[in-house]
Amino acid sequence: MPPFWGKTKLEIFDSVRSAKLWFHSHLWDQISASAKDLITRMLCVDPSKRFTANEIVSIDQLSGKRRLWVI
């Protein structure tokens, strides 16, 4: 389940557009806080605060040094 939620397609679209993330507990509990933080930072509406591709690939967890999340 994606981190966007709404009762209608329009509400879901508005959630996506405004980056209102909702990590539904029973589906996202097994995902680490650092992975959820990464998703939040990648989907940030403000470009000055959003992670760039270079920032993402330079994260230690993504370079294989250790695991970022458990699926």
Image (spheres, grey):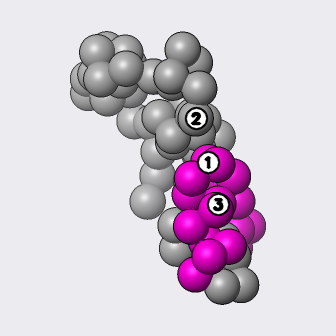
Amino acid carrying mark 3 in the image? Ser
**Residue numbers of the magenta segment:** 9-29
Amino acid at circle 1: Ala
Image spot of residue 28 (x, y percent): 62, 62
Pick whichever of labels 3 and 2 is earlier in the sequence. 3
Q: Earlier in the sequence, mark 2 or mark 1?
A: 1
Q: Is residue 28 visible?
A: no
Q: Is residue 48 magenta?
A: no
Residue 6 visible in image:
yes
- Of 17 and 5, which appears nearest the observer? 17
Secondary structure of the residue carrying numbered label 2: loop
Left or right of residue 4: residue 61: left
According to the image, label 1 marks what residue? 19
Count neighbours of disc 3 (C-alpha within 10 A) and say few if under 14, some if 14 to 19, many if 20 or more: some
At numbered mark 1, what does the secondary structure look like: helix, strand or loop? loop
Q: Is residue 25 left or right of residue 10?
A: right
Q: Residue at x 70, y 59 (%)?
A: 22
Residue at screen point 73% across, 67% down: 25
- Callout 3–callout 1 Cβ contact below 8 Å: yes
In 3D space, how far apart are the residues under numbered discs 3 and 1 (Cα atoms)? 6 Å
Q: Residue furthest bottom?
A: 8
User: Picture coordinates of residue 39 (x, y %)?
Assistant: 51, 42
* Rendered view: 56 above or below 25: above
Q: Which residue is mark 3?
A: 15
Is 39 displayed left or right of 37 in the figure?
Answer: left
Kindly identify the residue that appears in the image at 52 percent across and 73 percent down.
Answer: 1
Gap in Å between the C-alphas at discs 3 and 2?
11 Å
Overall secondary structure of the magenta section: helix
Q: What residue sits right under mark 2 in the picture?
A: 45
